[in-house]
Image (cartoon, coloured by chain):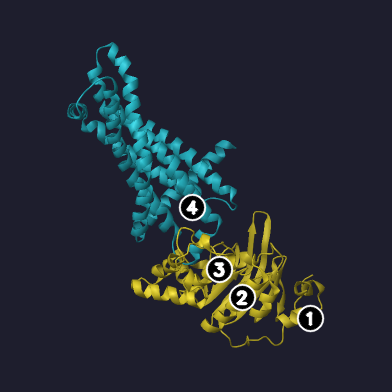
Chain colours: A cyan, B yellow
């Protein structure tokens, strides 16, 4: 029964995704709503991403220091922390935060619009609610999540610098030159590409859960909760696939 | 126990009148629950039809089928002479653009102010209008429902009656030829219910719209109806003017008017 429900859900999400690509290429774009969603999703997430990004860099540096100090390799800290952040930690942690904040927000917003007949009202007014509500939100998350991850990378490096200076002393220019030396395009590009998929799935799952909320206020909470759980799980699955592909291409 | 009561003198003459809504043998079931079992009804241009019936009798389902919100299982749903069950999404939207629908909850967009609620519909339907023209039409629509002072309020700041009026203004702003009202006075006190009913009547006279009004509120039905139909067990059980049905021989029909 669980297996059947899972496959049914996958089928519905696939149809939803198909409709998204159909609408995006066949109808005019709600640019104003898209810009508003970019602001709501991107700009309003900055404080949360700043704080978590800084803490990620700081904690990673502090945790790495004792082990590396045993081998006299403290000078590796800036490069190692930056690589960890850029390749894995910042994309995944930021995407998980976005899943918690954005996917649940979209799920709850569209869910409440559904149960209070606002989506129906749009439809009977001959306004395409899918194009106005879904396409704009998915486009906004697909664009904003990668930008938030890049921002989290930068703040994480600053956090790493702060963590490094708790026990040692190094100038900011020296620290950052080591950071830049340790990075290659091969580190940045696969990590950035996967964040577009994170963003796409965060928006897609939030919209799908909200758009298909059943009648009743209870379903709004369920839609928000289910959006977070499913989006978080999909982030780990995408990450696993992305690592396999990167590894395959590198070898 | 179906009762057919045909009124001999409806307020608007049915003969030679243009049928703008023509429903034939409409069937709809949700799983095993058969809601509509062959509903047929016609509404003439400019006519105001009130639909009565117990809760769950399929009144709302009927008008939701009429705008394509619910897909009918079987039957013909002609609006302006076109069977909407045969239309694709774009064609259906062209028909919808000529219709207005007032939801039971008014269904105002929570994230938008009253001004934006009204302008939103207009901007999508009349893209040629300038910002000033949109603003003017918004103000005019609000004046027609007597709530121009609420223009900057958010839906959460409005009372139930105000929400219904704003919902009405939002649908009227596109000058619909057909208005569908889903329980417009439900949840309102007697005085506000009467105000909404009078407003519906005034707007019908002013804009000469064809209307279907679903209600349990008999004073509203008395005030607004040219003709009344009563749904029972998924079919039209009685039809006539308010006065004729009120004096019906059928006790069940009369029970609506007590």
Q: CA distance from mark 1 to mark 2?
A: 27 Å
Tag 4 and tag 3, C-beta contact below 8 Å:
no
The residue closer to the viewer here, B147 or B99, is B147
User: Of discs 1 and 2, which sits in the foreground?
Assistant: 2
Tag 2 and tag 3, C-beta contact below 8 Å:
no
Q: Tag 2: Cα neighbours inside 10 Å, few (<14), some, or many (≥20)? A: some
Horizontal side of residue A18 vs B229, given as left or right: left
Tag 4 and tag 1, C-beta contact below 8 Å:
no
* Residue B94: quadrant of the picture: bottom left
Name the chain letter of the residue that bears numbered label 4. Answer: A
Count of picture labels: 4
User: Of discs 3 and 1, which sits in the foreground?
Assistant: 3
Residue behind mark 4: A110
Residue A54 spot, x, y in % from top left: 33, 33
Looking at the image, residue A95 lies above or below residue B197: above
**In the rendered view of the protein, which quadrant contains the C terminus of chain A?**
top left
For image coordinates 17% across by 26% down, the residue present is A174
Residue behind mark 3: B162
The residue closer to the viewer here, B140 or B229, is B140
Q: CA distance from mark 4 to mark 2?
A: 32 Å
Q: CA distance from mark 3 to mark 1?
A: 35 Å
Q: Tag 1: Cα neighbours inside 10 Å, few (<14), some, or many (≥20)? A: few
């Amino acid at each position: 029964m669980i297996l059947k429900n899972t496959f049914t859900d996958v089928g519905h999400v696939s149809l939803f995704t198909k409709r998204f690509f159909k609408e995006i290429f066949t109808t005019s774009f709600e640019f104003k709503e898209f810009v508003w969603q970019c602001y709501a999703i991107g700009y309003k997430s900055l404080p949360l991403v700043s704080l978590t990004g800084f803490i990620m860099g700081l904690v990673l540096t502090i945790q790495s220091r004792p082990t590396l100090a045993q081998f006299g390799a403290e000078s590796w800290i800036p490069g190692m922390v930056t690589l960890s952040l850029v390749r894995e930690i910042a994309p995944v942690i930021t995407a998980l935060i976005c899943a918690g904040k954005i996917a649940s927000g979209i799920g709850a917003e569209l869910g409440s619009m559904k149960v209070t007949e606002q989506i129906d009202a749009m439809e009977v007014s001959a306004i395409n609610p899918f194009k106005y509500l879904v396409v704009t939100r998915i486009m906004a998350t697909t664009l904003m999540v990668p930008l938030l991850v890049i921002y989290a990378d930068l703040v994480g490096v600053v956090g790493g610098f702060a963590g490094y200076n708790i026990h040692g002393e190094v100038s900011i220019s020296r620290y950052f030159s080591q950071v830049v030396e340790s990075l290659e395009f091969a580190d940045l590009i696969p990590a950035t590409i996967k964040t577009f998929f994170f963003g796409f799935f965060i928006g897609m799952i939030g919209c799908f859960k909200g758009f298909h909320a059943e009648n009743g206020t209870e379903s709004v909470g369920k839609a928000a909760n289910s959006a977070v759980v499913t989006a978080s799980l999909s982030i780990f699955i995408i990450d696993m696939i992305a690592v396999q592909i990167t590894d395959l291409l590198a070898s | 126990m179906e009762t057919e009561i045909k009124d001999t003198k409806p307020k608007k003459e049915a003969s030679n009148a243009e049928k703008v809504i023509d429903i034939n043998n409409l069937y709809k079931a949700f799983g095993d629950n058969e809601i509509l079992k062959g509903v047929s009804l016609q509404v003439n241009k400019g006519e105001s039809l009130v639909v009565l019936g117990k809760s769950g009798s399929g009144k709302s389902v009927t008008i939701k089928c009429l705008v394509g919100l619910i897909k009918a299982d079987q039957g013909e749903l002609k609006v302006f002479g076109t069977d909407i069950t045969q239309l694709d999404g774009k064609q259906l939207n062209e028909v919808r653009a000529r219709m207005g629908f007032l939801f039971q909850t008014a269904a105002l967009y929570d994230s938008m102010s009253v001004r934006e609620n009204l302008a939103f519909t207009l901007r999508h339907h009349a893209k040629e209008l300038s910002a000033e023209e949109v603003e003017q039409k918004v103000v005019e629509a609000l004046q027609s429902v007597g709530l121009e002072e609420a223009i900057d309020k958010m839906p959460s700041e409005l009372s139930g009656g105000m929400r219904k009026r704003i919902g009405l203004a939002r649908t009227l702003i596109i000058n619909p030829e057909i208005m569908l009202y889903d329980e417009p006075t439900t949840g309102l006190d007697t005085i506000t219910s009467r105000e909404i009913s009078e407003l519906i009547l005034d707007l019908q006279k002013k804009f000469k719209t064809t209307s279907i009004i679903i209600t349990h509120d008999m004073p509203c039905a008395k005030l607004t109806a040219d003709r009344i139909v009563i749904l029972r067990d998924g079919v039209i059980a009685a039809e006539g003017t308010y006065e004729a049905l009120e004096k019906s021989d059928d006790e069940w029909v009369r029970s609506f008017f007590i």
